Amino acid sequence: MAQELILIRITGEDRPGLTAGIMGILAQYDADIMDIGQADIHKTLSLGLLIRVDEQNSGPLMKNVLFKAAELGVNVRFFPVTDEDYNAWVGRQGKNRYILTVLGRRLSSKQLEAVTKVIAEQGLNIDSIRRLTGRPPLAENAEDPNATRNKACIEFSLRGTPRDRNVMQRELLKMSGKMAMDCSFQQDNMYRRMRRLICFDMDSTLIQAECIDELAARHGVGDKVAAITARAMRGEIDFKESFTERVALLKGLDVSVMQDIAEHLPITEGAERLMLVLKKYGYKIAILSGGFTFFGEYLQKKFGIDYVYANELEVGEDGKLTGRYVGDIVDGTRKAELLRLIAQVEKVDLAQTIAVGDGANDLPMLSLAGLGIAFHAKPRVVADAKQSINTIGLDGVLYFLGFKDSYLDV
């Protein structure tokens, strides 16, 4: 018996039982569901159904769906679909899929206009759009300490192949800097959905401080350490030489000072929420830092972090720093090596790893990880990392992983 393909579009005010009522009629005529999609925005329903039904049943089916729609107070439209149209649609489903995540304190129509224009210029089709963050308040109290911590995130599911992915990345990066938003463009594959290991830089990433500067300030050598750091940034000396010189200036500092600094570390906005979620969902977490193990281990106990690799300061029998370090320096190359090593130990594919950092010495691990995120980093690091967060706190990482606020209880 001949069969027909019919696209049914239903719109109107949503209510419990609406979809069930429509399905009940389709079931009476033994219709096959070839595709289905539904969205509900502020109680306004948009339901699409592609059905296949015996030709002799199509007329009665549509008539009864119309009656049911009238009863429910919604609008319904029917569109015939040819075999050629259906086969062309099936063929398009094999195209590459991407996720474009847009973050900011607020997201406006101007920002989304710019983003969607880039999507269109690259020949990509938007399959779906969803908001990952909770709804913003209508009024904001300027005296509320949380008023500046609002966040907004929208995720676009895209289908197709970008005409030029590098050009697209550059356009998104340029817009992000000008329009106070962050954009993450990732291929939507199983690795993205199954991240398992995340590695963090510590100083200026997990904490809003540089521990060596804090130690130097307490020891009265802050200016000298800053001068060495400036020389290293100008390329006059390499990282190992600058690190050795700076550590030498800490000679004689009592270890008790380190404990006091650790207890007063300024934790980055969103870090506690991020750690709670990552631990709850079984991620392995590592600190890979050019800072010091003393502070890394303090954070390890605080957040239940699985691995800490940083630089070990030598302590004399008198309980004071000797001005030397123990073991190899954890620099950029070593961070990448450690990420690879931990992934092997945990039996995690590199494509399932995440790295987050702010400095040039984080670039090797950001490049190696399946998802490398520059966090409030310098322009050079942002450009090389491809994914960046500059507008909100560290829990912005959750949205790049596809988490939705309504799924979380923290």
Image (cartoon, helix red, strand yellow):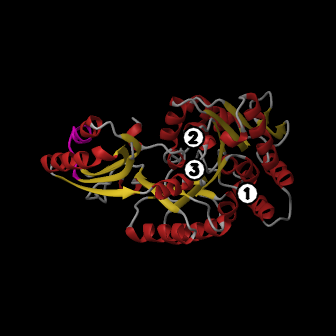
Q: CA distance from mark 1 to mark 2?
A: 28 Å
Looking at the rendering, the stretch of residues picked out in magenta corresponds to 12-22
Residue 223: in sight, yes or no? yes
Q: Which of the pair 149/298 is nearer the observer?
A: 149
From the viewer's perspective, is 314 left or right of 95? right
Q: CA distance from mark 2 to mark 3?
A: 30 Å
Task: Locate residue 155 relative to residue 64 in the image: left or right.
Answer: right
Q: Indicate which label's residue lies in the foreground, 1 or 2.
A: 2
Dot 1 amino acid type? Ala
For marks 1 and 2 on the same chain, the one whose residue lies earlier in the sequence: 2
Toward the left, the furthest residue is 71
Neighbours of disc 1 within 10 Å: few (<14), some (14-19), many (20+): some
Q: Amino acid at mark 3?
A: Gln
Instruction: Identify the residue at horizontal 39%, vertical 35% (top origin).
Output: 409
Q: Secondary structure at mark 2?
A: helix
Give the residue at mark 2.
Answer: 193
Tell whether 119 sits left or right of 335: left
- Are the residues tagged 2 and 3 within 8 Å (C-beta)? no
Q: Amino acid at mark 2?
A: Arg
Foreground residue, 167 or 316?
167
- Residue 98: x, y in percent? 57, 54
Residue 360's label in the rendered image is 1
Task: Tell which tag, 2 or 3, sits nearer the viewer.
Answer: 2
Q: Is residue 313 above or below residue 132?
A: above
Q: Which residue is mark 3?
A: 208
Q: Is residue 6 above or below residue 28?
A: below
In this rendering, the answer to whether 303 lies above or below 73 is: above
How busy is the neighbourhood of tag 3: few (under 14 within 10 Å), some, or many (20 plus)?
Answer: some
For discs 3 and 1, the disc positioned in front in the rendered view? 1
Say left or right for 410 vs 183: left
Whole-percent x, y for residue 2 in the image: 39, 46
Element type at marker 3?
Answer: loop
